[in-house]
Image (cartoon, coloured by chain):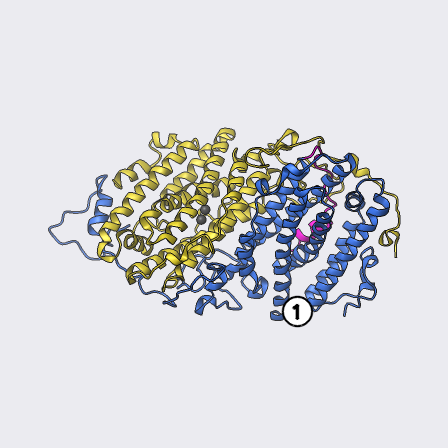
Chain colours: A yellow, B blue
Amino acid sequence: MSEAANGAERELDLGWMDRTGPLETRAEPGKYGLTIADISIGDYGEAPEASDNLTGRPRGAAARPASYRIGAYPVRSKNDIWLDNASFLYEEALQRQWSSATDVPWHTIEPLPDDVEQAECQLATFLTEVEFVAGDVPARWVSLTTPDFYEPRQVLLAQVMDESRHMDVFRKRALANGGGLMQATGATSGFVGSIDLSRDFTEMSSRLHVSGEGSVLTLFRMGELMAQNEAEKVIYRLCAQDEARHVAFGVMHLRYMSETAPERREEIHCYLDEAEGGLIGAANPVGQLTPTSESMAIILGGGKDHFDDGMNKIIAIRRRQLQEYRKRVISAGFGERFENGRSRVAQMIEEAA
Amino acid sequence: MARKPAAKPSPPKQPAPKPAPPKSAVADEKRTFEPKYNWMNKTRQWGVRVKPGKAGLKLGDLNVGIYGETPTQWADQSRNPRGAVPRRGMPPVGYSIRDKAGLWADCAADLYEEAIQRRWAPATDVPWDTIEPLPDDVEHAVCQVCTELLGYANVDIETITGWQHQMSYGYHEVKQFLATASFDAARHYECFRKRALANGGGLGLEGPGMVNRMILESRGGWTEAVVYLLLMRGAFTMTLYKYLGRHAHNDAERFIYEHALADKARHVTYALDHLKYAMAHADDVLQVVRTLIAIGEGGLTRDLRDPVLAEALAVIFAGGVAKAAGRGMAVYGDMMRDYVATYLGYCRWLGVPRDPARLPPPLNEYADSTDTGA
Ligand SMILES: [Fe+2]
Ligand SMILES: [Fe+2]
């Protein structure tokens, strides 16, 4: 046995005590506890414009010259992924986690007429199908991003968790009331320009966070109209809370990008052109007529007999989706597209009047 | 679009189609659309009514009838939810992990729900106000250990998120459990950074990185990553948390280590369950794991020969530099013996027992020679 294993004394080197990041850092908890914003102080708060961290070390730690370059991160320019309120969104996500097992009052679900239950199950099948594209894709981007930008990474990790819960809450809904899953739509397949296939983070984020989840957020906020019982109301309300954070990520990131990388503005407009082309498409349950929007009309109208009432509500929700999309894009700093005739959204809103 | 397809010729009196005026599209949609309802009754199993139990409506409760059937291969490359009627002809999303043996663990659904029930928020749940100034050498050591643990959490994050999107939709329980695992890792990343910056210190020196490299370089499949990340590193991290919890300086540290340990225990539970499943259901996995752990032990010992982590731990265990070489290193030795015993126990349970005498140094020095490994 060696000395170490025996617990016998051995000379300590202690050279590591002189190889540190800045010392005498004393972050203080504030009103919301000790948040990421609270520890963003001194040099530790400074994310570099371009990260040369190829070893995966925590930002601000002392580097070892002998370290392996194991982190060939494709995302290492700050404006590729940064946003100003990541700390807030992440901490909020932690505070607002919920459980689909115990926070949804499942016992309030009562048998529904067959057409309505089928419609609920069709919608739940669609949502189970699409929710985790918003888990799969951000997860992949986390693995490609330098830890020097750990704040946005944390928000994306919270999103993956949120989406996992969304995927499961709609599966639970489909199997809780005498129905079952129905037919998938293929809405997230690998088409060029789809969320999965984006080769740039901002491209992905404009499509996933701003247009895609933006539309879903508007929809979930209409949960009072859609819900047949208290359980569904709670599901939509809690999901909307989560989606609001995901959308905020995208809007705030686009804003940061528009302010710090003006040379990319034209390119971003191209992504928005594409996104707008799909705003009322098949991947939107209140888009143009698909199995999912037929089921939405039944849910909103209260049965096949009231399909037209349901359609009217669909069109109202669609209008609101478009209006909210326009507001978000303006807030992100790309509002000129609504002034200069580039965007068709105004016309789409008018058509939905 | 909602307008009817132009399959039938227009009746003669109808004027030729012309560009629609602005408001017409939706008005047409409202007026002329006849719902097809051709999606109705398309289901593989109807009449399912899963009731919540004492612990609510859990993910695993949904595994009834065809919804609980998890085939050994998942050929569907779309996000077709398990048990739904697939839509044919859609371009594949491109999942690379399509064999159940490549990721499955029966406990994943339960671990998922458990992770959600046991969630915690470092900002508000950790009693940060219990942290008091420590002697410089001890604070330094705490900060150094936190820096290493940040590195571990970083590799957890990068590895899990690098694999997650490659896993087929049909095994959603595992994808969902891993979402909790990478979120746990985010929480660990956050709370060790917070601890390092909260008490007059700062971050220390980055870790040596051999095991990190080994984990990130595991390209042979998720199972290989599980061996390195969740079994070997996971058991080591658990042991560190356990000893750091015992030597915590305040309630804040105690809280952090206790909760991080509970999180990590779930990851290791998944790992053991998955490896057992993979070995039982796929040809050659047992042999491959045997080879991987032999390679892994080599990587681990290279990191262990670096003195920084051991010394920082010794300073913490001894309450300062003065007794670090003696008492501190003695506790470090206990910790390493604990780790090696745990690790050998896992190997034995998995059916890949290790001969303690043949472990590479310094691991063999911490092995109980009476632990025959059989
Ligand atoms: Fe979602
Ligand atoms: Fe979302």
Residue A185 appears in the figure: no
Q: Main secondary structure of the magenta part?
A: loop
Q: Is residue A41 left or right of residue A63?
A: left
Q: Which residue is mark 1?
A: B284
Q: Is residue A349 visible?
A: yes
Q: Where is residue A154? Give x, y as percent.
A: 56, 42
Q: Nearer the viewer, residue B282 or A124?
A: A124
Identify which amino acid the numbered label 1 is placed on. Answer: Asp
Residue at 61 percent of width and 67 percent of height: B277
The part of the image, by quadrant, that contains residue B344 is bottom right
Q: Residue B224, how many percent across, how many down?
A: 65, 59
The answer to whether residue A237 is left or right of residue A25 is: left
Residue placed most toward the observer, A121 or A258:
A121
Q: Which residues are magenta?
A: B199-218
What chain does badge 1 belong to? B
Is residue A112 toward the left or the right of residue A53 in the image?
left
Nearer to us in this view, A163 or B1: A163
Identity of the residue drawn at 39% across and 53% down: A231
Vertical position of residue A290 compared to residue B45: above or below: above
